Amino acid sequence: MKIDSKKYPLQPRWPLNIDPIDGPYESIREAKESIQQNFIFLLQTIPGEWPMDPELGVGVSTYLFETYNSADLVSFKSNLRIQINKYLPSIKLVEANFIHSEQDQDSLNTTLKITYSIDALGVLDEIDFGLDTSYKTEVFNVFTPDTVSKFGKDF
């Protein structure tokens, strides 16, 4: 029996909005969007924030006041990979870098650019996190089937 992913809600969409069709909250109905939302939650959750699993979370906001090229920023990628492998095994990390220009350094801004894949869905996506107060987190689907092929089978 095939389940129509458009018919059944997987989880509430964040931020919560009232939806007269799905009941109390607007729902996510696609696996890709559900996994993306879970990934963003994992990135934003600070370790220790969940009492039942104090190891859960990357805590992107804890890197806000790190100096450029600090040891914590250098170890971020390995910490991210550990968290993904443990809590979201359907995601493969392709690349994660802090991007900033000299002007950004002067104004204490940086952007975390994460490229990841969801092999089961054939998805290659990018998330940009701004680590300053004026930048909103955005998820971009910047890859098309043509650009995915350049990464090969294992991205």
Image: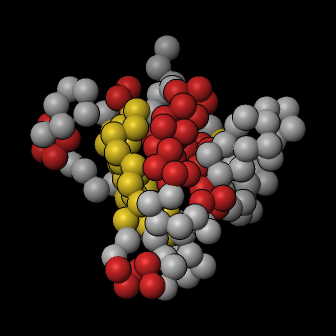
Answer above or below: position of 92 versus 16. Answer: above
The colour scheme of the drawn protein is: secondary structure
Asked if residue 113 shows in the view, the reply is yes
Identify which residue is drawn at 31% across, 33% down. Answer: 122
x, y percentage for residue 7? Answer: 55, 38
* Left or right: residue 28 compared with residue 78: right
Residue shown at 44% from the left, 60% from the top: 69
Give the mark count.
0
The answer, for residue 12, to whether it is visible in the render is no
Q: In which quarter of the image is residue 111?
A: bottom left
Q: Dividing the picture into quarters, in which one does residue 42 lie?
A: top right
Q: Where is residue 91 in the image (x, y as percent from the top left)?
A: 45, 33
- The answer to which of 7 and 78 lies nearer the viewer is 78
Q: Is residue 128 above or below residue 29?
A: below
Q: Which x, y percent locates residue 146? A: 13, 44
Q: Residue furthest right?
A: 51
Q: Is residue 64 left or right of residue 30?
A: right
Q: In which quarter of the image is the C terminus?
A: top left
Q: Which residue is drawn at 60% across and 79% down?
A: 133
User: Which residue is the extreme one toward the top?
Assistant: 1
Q: Which residue is drawn at 73% across and 54% down?
A: 25
Q: Where is residue 104 in the image (x, y as percent from the top left)?
A: 41, 80
Q: Nearer the viewer, residue 28 or 50?
A: 50
Image quadrant in which you'd find residue 101: bottom left
